[in-house]
């Protein structure tokens, strides 16, 4: 069976220290060390997935098209080093505008990927920088690893 590492986007892969919402390609900046860390994890046989809340879409601050452009840019930067994010799950909703079943801490986005790719949850992890990430992981029966936002995760993911 496939083992996977699910990863939060903002503060983990993309540096959001200077912009809470990242929706312009010029704001796409990788967190220090992320390429090396993801490459190492991928080389150990884990498939990589991103699971991200983008409530700014619900709030009308930007569109799914903006998010997809950001993702293309991010994937390009990672692909240069051979890192492949297999799929990116996006929740475009925000509680203040519209309720949904997918926004983390709900586990639905993770569960859909688990089903689609036949992921072995006992061998998989979720790496995030927030309490909601850890709750979503727990509810999907995945081990959560909480890292410090926008910092090199290397020391925190040694078990991987
Ligand atoms: Mg985050
Ligand atoms: Zn949602």
Image (spheres, rainbow, N blue to C red):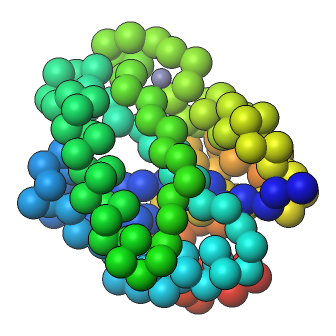
Q: Position of residue 156 (x, y in %)?
A: 61, 81
Report whether 122 appears left or right of 76.
right
Report whether 83 appears left or right of 101.
left
Residue 107 shows in the view = no
Residue beneath the point at 51% across and 65% down: 84
Q: Measured along the vertical axis of the image, is residue 93 above or below residue 38?
A: above
Foreground of the two, 71 or 18:
71
Report whether 20 appears left or right of 1.
left
Quarter where residue 126 is shown: bottom right
Quarter where residue 68 is shown: top left
Q: Residue furthest top?
A: 98
Report whether 52 appears left or right of 2.
left
Residue beneath the point at 27% across and 30% down: 64
Q: Position of residue 151 (x, y in %)?
A: 39, 78
Residue beneath the point at 81% across and 49% down: 119
Foreground of the two, 79 or 91:
79
Q: Position of residue 21 (x, y in %)?
A: 22, 46
Q: Quadrant of the C terminus?
A: bottom right
Q: Position of residue 1 (x, y in %)?
A: 89, 55
Foreground of the two, 47 or 134:
47
Residue 88 shows in the view = yes
Q: Measured along the vertical axis of the image, is residue 68 above or below residue 123?
A: above
């Amino acid at each position: 069976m496939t083992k996977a590492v699910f990863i939060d986007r903002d503060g983990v892969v993309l540096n959001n220290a200077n912009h809470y919402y990242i929706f312009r390609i010029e704001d796409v900046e990788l967190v220090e060390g992320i390429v090396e860390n993801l490459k190492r994890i991928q080389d150990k046989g884990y498939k990589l997935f991103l699971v991200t809340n983008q409530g700014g879409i619900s709030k009308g601050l930007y569109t799914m098209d903006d998010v997809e452009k950001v993702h293309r840019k991010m994937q390009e930067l990672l692909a240069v080093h051979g890192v492949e994010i297999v799929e990116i799950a996006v929740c475009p909703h925000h509680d203040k505008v519209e309720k949904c079943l997918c926004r983390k801490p709900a586990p639905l986005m993770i569960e859909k990927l688990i089903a689609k790719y036949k992921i072995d949850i006992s061998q998989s992890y979720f790496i995030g920088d927030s309490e909601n990430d850890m709750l979503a992981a727990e509810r999907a029966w995945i081990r959560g690893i909480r890292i410090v936002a926008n910092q090199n995760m290397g020391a925190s993911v040694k078990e991987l």
